[in-house]
Image: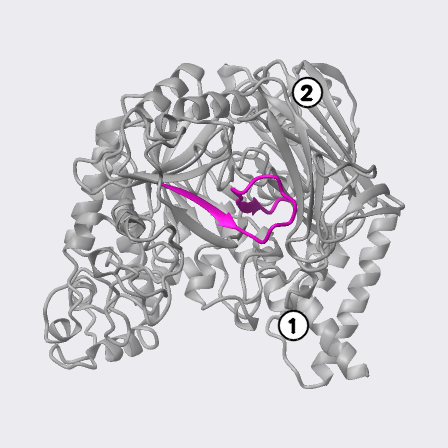
Amino acid sequence: MDTSVSRRLLQTIDCTGEFGPDRYFSHGIASVVETDAGRYREAEGVPGARFAYRFAIEHVGRPHEVVIQYPDDKRRFMCVMDGTCYDLTTGVLTGGCQPLSRKMLELRQVFWPRWKDCSIVFMTWGEGEPAAAARIEVFELDDLPPMRVAGDSAYGPFREIGVQYEDPCGTCASEGALNRDEWTDRIVAYMKHTGQQSLTYPLAWYHGPTFPSDREPSSQLDWIVAPDRTCYSRWTSHPVDWYQRLLQRFSDEGLTFRGSLTMLRLGSLMAGMQVDEEAIHRGADTYNTVLWNGTVRAGTGDWTPMYDARFMSELAKKLDDAPEYEPLNSGQPGYPPFLYGERPNPDGGGPVFNPLHPTVQTAVLGFVREIAERYAKFPAFTGISFNYFAAQMLWFGSLRAGYDDYTISLFEKETGLKVPGNATSRDRFFQRHLYLTTRCRTAWIEWRCVKIRDLMRQIRDTLREVRPDLTVTLTLWQETAVPFLFSGMHAGTQLGARPGAFEIYREGGVDWDMFRHEPGILLDLEMGDSRDRGGHGANPAAGVNTPLEVDCMFRDHAYLDTCSLEAAGRQDLPGAFLFNCWVEAWGRYLWFPVEPDDSNLTVVSDMDGQRPDAIVRSHSEYPADGFWWEPQMRITPALKGGGHFLEGFCHALAELDACRITQGGLFLDTAHTEELRRFASVFRSLPNEKFETVGHTTDPVAVRSLVKDDRRFVYFVNREYYPVAVTVAFNQAPGNVINAATGESEPGLSPWMVVLSPYELRAIIVAPEIALTGFEARPPAEIASVLEQRAREALADIESVRLSGVLVPGMDEMEEGISRAMEEKRYAWLRRALDGYIVRKCRALAADRSE
């Protein structure tokens, strides 16, 4: 518990007690259970089963904290929420690939209530993954004081940890905020309290700018929840530039802001699309993507076409003639066509536009310049970040795209290579694809990567013409790319069966190695793995019945794709984004007209000081189950429970030597205050430079060192869930060792010994002449023994499968990797490999063979 915060207990709820219907309800049987972890209440292991408590607070808008005790004794996917908005929403994952503690754990969620009559709901998401809670305490907090950061500015700049949003639509449904200023106040307070100094937030979402652009059609969507729990959706195609207020505030507070651009569409390009395939086959120019078979893309092929203010207004017109409308039901009669004639793709998701076409590049560079000229005057503004989704327009997406006449003629001109295919033949696109992906594959991939690198250089230079220190970040997603590029998750998308992220991006036109030493261009690898636990596949709430092919694909690639991890780590300043993906249960989602006498109209019709284009009431309907209010929303992030929350942070640092780490997704994560403070206090004391790795391994502990001026900085990071004893040898006794996070000193001996707690980062400062000559990391003997036994069993299973004549792609490499990890005592990699697809698939096949 953070002792710097003054708090007052308001209420304690014993979840094993009995309460009347005014304070408690359950949907399905919620039983009191007793295990080795203790007594607690548990919902049924059926998706949607839930129980809830009602409690009162005294002061709306003040920071509060709810402390939840829950059991870490079996596999669970628990959604925690108030049932109506995001203010109290978080998710808890236990079990699966996360070893259980079999103890009671605590979740501490900071929230700003928007009503006095509060509720907290515990809902089972996945089959056989029941929600459970033992005790709830509700505190009112006096404030959230800023965390002290110990780093001496003379040794900066320091490493960056921060918040990243993918979705900008929930501002007034989270953090108790009813307007943008309240939201800003609260994210500033929480970021400073937890030591997070940077915010990455959309300046352009699925349909272009969310600010009032002079070049492109703008669109800003928002969901607001009123103090009486009524929910409203609203939008505008003429947004106010509220970002200027945010940037001024961040500049005053010493925080930084990076504008993210999910460049799927720009309105000027959408309006001028040439998608007449007959004309294009006859030789007409187009800046749309042309595929290997001559198909012309006229849409992103994903979930995003409806998320534009102008299209929302078309949907809202349906309420002129009906008391309610289902806006997500695109198959209903009378559903309006998408803007600009956008249509689905026959080959799934991918970029609509050709990134090499001059029309596309002119639009992009003009848009980037507009952003720089609008926001570079604010010190907090550090640059832009491109979200690389499957359909992002600044790459090709895959080798299936890029066979238009313009691109091929440019390739021939610049390389001197002749590409087969008659210029008037309808099959020239296929002929080009066949030749360029077989006989000329190496040159074709390299040339496309060079052209995308050159485009990124132009974007960087455009920014820096306005302010020389601005940067461009490429956020290299997998969660929003792989399922669309590979048509879902299946045996063919597993580790060993498909290319890793590095090769996927190269084939799409982004060669990470070409950016290693590019000033002002940064690469952040998206490393989230929680999507494996729900939200994708034919049954997104399958839980314990999730098919193996859906259960571990993201995790395997995040932790075991050595080629991609090494490529990301080769960057001069590597970065990582830990995506807090979420799951959604929509029930029957409805819009309703807003009545003229609606008591909330004054509040909800004020969208940054002006009226929105339209407002509708909106919520999901479910069968009555005892919940006290009609408006409901069930959208929850999937976050690792207990200490495992820091697994991704420690993995990014140990594997990449990450200089930047951001995490987030839909709204601010306020359920891991102590974990974030503990990690950030050390991480931000480290200079923002690559360190030199000490020794021959970073598993299970990475040790790295950097001499900067008159100091040597050394950090130790334990990437595992168990404590590890570390002995460090110096070339001489270091004298006093300074704790980099606190500034306190302690006597230093050689060898110097420390026990790193689970997922702990620790850093020290010594004199520059004190060199590290080696270290030894010793995990608990019982942990090593169990892993080695499991490894021997996995090797036997792989051999059994081989003898049966079956090949699981990647199993030979996995066999070699397991043997090598045992020999080198790399237990972190070994644990994740043993929980991965290849080993589990071989185990299942070997078991079938033995029956």
Q: Residue at x 23, y 59 (%)?
A: 354
User: CB under 8 Å between callouts 2 and 1?
Assistant: no
Res. 190 image quadrant: top right
What residue is disc 1 on?
812
Is 296 or 158 nearer to us in this picture? Answer: 296
Q: Is residue 146 left or right of residue 166?
A: right
Query: Can residue 519 be seen at all in this image of the molecule?
Result: no
What residue is disc 2 on?
739
Q: Secondary structure at mark 1?
A: helix
Res. 540 image quadrant: bottom right
Provide residue 381's location: percent of width, then percent of height: 35, 26
Provide residue 655's location: percent of width, then percent of height: 59, 45
Provide residue 739's location: percent of width, then percent of height: 68, 20
Residue type highlighted by circle 1? Asp
Q: Provide the residue span drawn in magenta.
A: 616-639
Residue type highlighted by circle 2? Asn
Q: Residue at x 23, y 43 (%)?
A: 458
User: How many angstroms separate mark 2 from mark 1 (CA)?
Assistant: 45 Å
Is 383 or 244 nearer to us in this picture? Answer: 244
Residue at the farthest bottom position: 805
Q: Secondary structure at mark 2?
A: strand
Q: Is residue 516 left or right of residue 831?
A: left
Q: Residue at x 25, y 80 (%)?
A: 431
681 w.r.t. 575: above or below: above
